[in-house]
Amino acid sequence: MRSPLAKLTAASALALILFGGAAGCAATPDASTPVPTSTATSPAPSPSATEPAPSSSPEPSETSSAEFGEFAGAELAQICIDATLSAFPAEVSFAPESTRIERREVTPEWLVLVPAQAAGLEAQAQCTIGGSPSAPELGMSSASLEPLPEEQIQNLIRGENEGGDR
């Protein structure tokens, strides 16, 4: 019988193989459905500092009202979901209300991490998005069957290791 760690490792490896084969096959948005892009401005601070965090990871940005340059948080989350949906198993469900959005030190300006559940695993859609809502620019898009470690998130914010190295 395989351990849960071995199952998770095998599932992650399968996701990497599947995504690697589909990386160049992602659909691009057509002209009739604009995808938001950003001119960098600072996001609003978290609404409450007194609420306990559910885990040690940073709290996600509020996606319903926060503005990220010209983008609303919900727009950035939807762009990322649309860009990665085909790389996930069919039974994926996203949690756009818990999206984490970070301003990057490089372009594209925004790192967007959308939590998901796929194949019974805690998954994550990961994108870098820039441009403007009328002409969004998708830098990186990745479907992962495990959330990125905080160290890798910080690397992506700085524009390092965007090739998927951990």
Image (tube, helix red, strand yellow):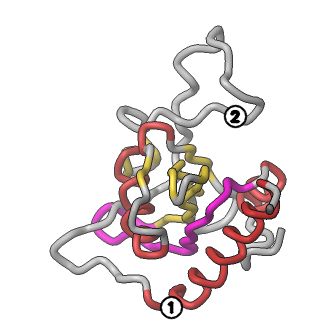
Residue at the (69%, 69%) spot, across then down: 12
Work out whether residue 154 or residue 114 is closer to the camera in this orientation and state it: 114
Q: Residue 157: name its quadrant.
A: bottom right
In the picture, measured across the screen, residue 131 lies left or right of residue 166, that is: left
Does 112 appear above or below 21?
Answer: above
Where in the figure is residue 53, as x and y percent of width and height? 67, 21
> Which residues make up the magenta segment?
131-148
Look at the numbered disc 1 and give the secondary structure of its residue. helix
Which mark is drawn over residue 2? none
**Which residue, given by chain and number where applicable, does mark 1 sit on?**
24
Where in the figure is residue 150, as x and y percent of width and height? 79, 48
Where in the figure is residue 55, as x and y percent of width and height? 72, 28
Q: Residue 51: name its quadrant.
A: top right
Where in the figure is residue 64, as x and y percent of width and height? 36, 35
Main SS class of the magenta portion in the image: strand
Q: What is the quadrant of the N terminus in the image?
A: bottom right
Q: Amino acid at mark 2?
A: Pro
Residue at the (60%, 53%) spot, across then down: 121
Look at the numbered disc 2 and give the secondary structure of its residue. loop
Which mark is drawn over residue 58? 2
Residue lying at the far front of the rendered structure: 1
Would you say residue 136 sits in the magenta stretch? yes
